[in-house]
Image: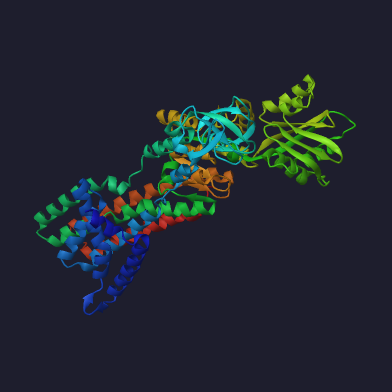
Amino acid sequence: MDKLENILEWGGVKKEIIFLILSGLALIGSIFHFTIFGVNLTWIPIILCGIPIILEAIIGLVTEFDIKADVLVSMALIASIITGEYFAAGEVAFIMQLGALLEDLTVAKARAGIEKLVRLTPRTARKIDGTKENVIPAEQVKIGDILRVLPGETIPADGVILTGQTSVNQAVMTGESLPVDKKSGDHVSSGTVNQFGSFDMKALRVGDDSSIQRMIRLVQSADAGKAKIVGIADRMATWIVVIALAAAALTWLISGEIIRAVTILVVFCPCALVLATPTAIMAAIGNATRCGFLVREGDALERLAAVSVITFDKTGTLTYGAPKVITVQNLYDELPRQELYSLIAGAELRSEHPLGKAVVRCFTETEAAEIPCSKEFIMLPGKGVQAIVKGRKVLAGNIELLSAEGIVLPDSVKNQAEDYLKNGSTIIYAAVDGKLSGFIALSDTIRDDAADTISRLSETGITPVLLTGDNQGAADNIAGQLGICEVRANCLPEDKLYQIEAYQSRHKQVCMIGDGINDAPALKKAFVGIAMGGTGSDIAVDAADIALINDKIHQLPHLLQLSKRMMVTIKCNLIFSMTLNFIAILLAITGILNPVIGALVHNAGSVIVIINSALLINWKKK
């Protein structure tokens, strides 16, 4: 059976498309009585499309005793061939394979998210033995080992810093794009990246117990726990087969005409039923694509229609994920705001720190003056920068930098800065010529369309929830501006996962929207995962069912309404196809329909289903 399955899978979608084109041309040719060497052209679709259906049905019955729609189709094909109704057999085979192809095209592409997470795992570590430094494979690191991490290297294990100061990019774990300053006594996690200074650390958790390995397990377990929606035709297949066989047998016994029994099997074929769902999904996917959504899972829109809660990551999703200068506060009139801003930008001009780059970018965008050049630039990891700008010594950094220079921060300045810190801003203090001169506050900025998007989602009955790795103050500030009532702050990847599990345990289907590596487990676990395709990480996109290519979240309400409209279309298709089947069966029992006319009626039903589904392509709620 395995070899048989491999043969059927050979060639993939390209083979199916070629076979369908040849079968369609053959059916058209048979209408005009064309033949090849005297052979009826309808044998082409019977062989190319019909035989794979029959083999799939046999494999399902033998290996799993799984009765699907293809069992009834196989019986109709075989009965039509036995009675010489070759055109009916070819038509049914062609329509069913067309439906199967549409389903295949809506199935998600193979994912590489977990593989990319694995590649984040450090390969080597610098182990310190006395005065020696040895590079060893990361898997050989043991608890208690002393490790050295240089700038730009990935931290090989969870542990605590013994000596040195640095800034660490923790996006893998928290989703925050800004590095976090670390010093002796602070904890660091495997998979995060050391940005600037070198440091020595003691390994506390290694191997499978490390943070990055736990992240990989979270993604794997979340994916394994997500149930897949089964097609309605396959769910009803067992009953359809039993009813069809019983109706055909009784009709044959009562009428004595086997042709009526064959006609019943042909019209009982769930052609329109099979096409009802995939055609609607394909049309809705086309609509979603035009609005900037890449639907990676065939049934994602079907699941999205049942969502009642949407959980949002903050940084990069509801905000732009890039710090912006929101205020420049000068303390003395002799050093005006414009001049202070110019000196700080000049000092940060050669900085590699994201905050320093943000100051330079914002100065360039908002100020008319040019940034002055700096001399004697010094990067002080974990503290800030020092430089000579316009002949003046400028310090720009945190409180530790000022303290090291003997500069005391007055309570009035602390209180002023505290107001910004409570709202999640980051402060860069500045001293000029050894004197505290002011500070700059930087903060992530909310997307222009975020507030309107949240408002429109709430109007549709959806509950928005903010899940963020940020502190409670910053989270509450953003949520307040956007009108989000439910907030969960200080969330690590496992915390976001548990929050989603909690909602789903209360029978609330959750859609998760995020952009970072740390969002991958939650995106996998959620009933539907949507990743920011433009600013998001590859791993987040691979973990999601849908990717928002242009990062314009204002289209989210349309996507939700589209999913609900798609389900209405599917239900209409199903009701129509079942009604048509019922009428056709009555006509077949009475002998009014023969197999060929029955197949044509079926085709007409399939065409109507396809046209109704196609209306979704340009659908937009008025």
> Residue 423 at what x, y percent from top left?
67, 28
Query: Could you tell me which residue is drawn at 46 percent across and 51 percent down?
Result: 284
- Residue 398: x, y in percent? 72, 29
The picture places residue 295, in percent across and down from the top left corner, at 47, 49
Q: As drawn, which residue projects farthest toward the bottom?
A: 37
Of the pair 169 and 146, the residue shown nearer to us: 146
Give the side of residue 175 with respect to residue 575, left or right: right
Q: Quick check: 563 above or below 595?
A: above
Q: Can residue 476 be seen?
A: yes
Q: Residue at x 45, y 49 (%)?
A: 296
Q: Residue at (26%, 55%) from the top-left corner?
A: 5
Marks counted in the figure total 0
**Depth check: 576 or 199 in front?**
199
Point out residue 340 in the picture as x, y percentages from the top left corner. 83, 36
Going by the image, does 547 lie left or right of 387?
left
Q: Residue at x 23, y 64 (%)?
A: 89
Query: Observer-nearest residue: 229 or 438?
Result: 438
User: Farthest right residue?
Assistant: 334
| Location of residue 33 (image quadrant) | bottom left
Question: In terms of depth relative to the viewer, which is nearer, 160 or 177?
Answer: 160
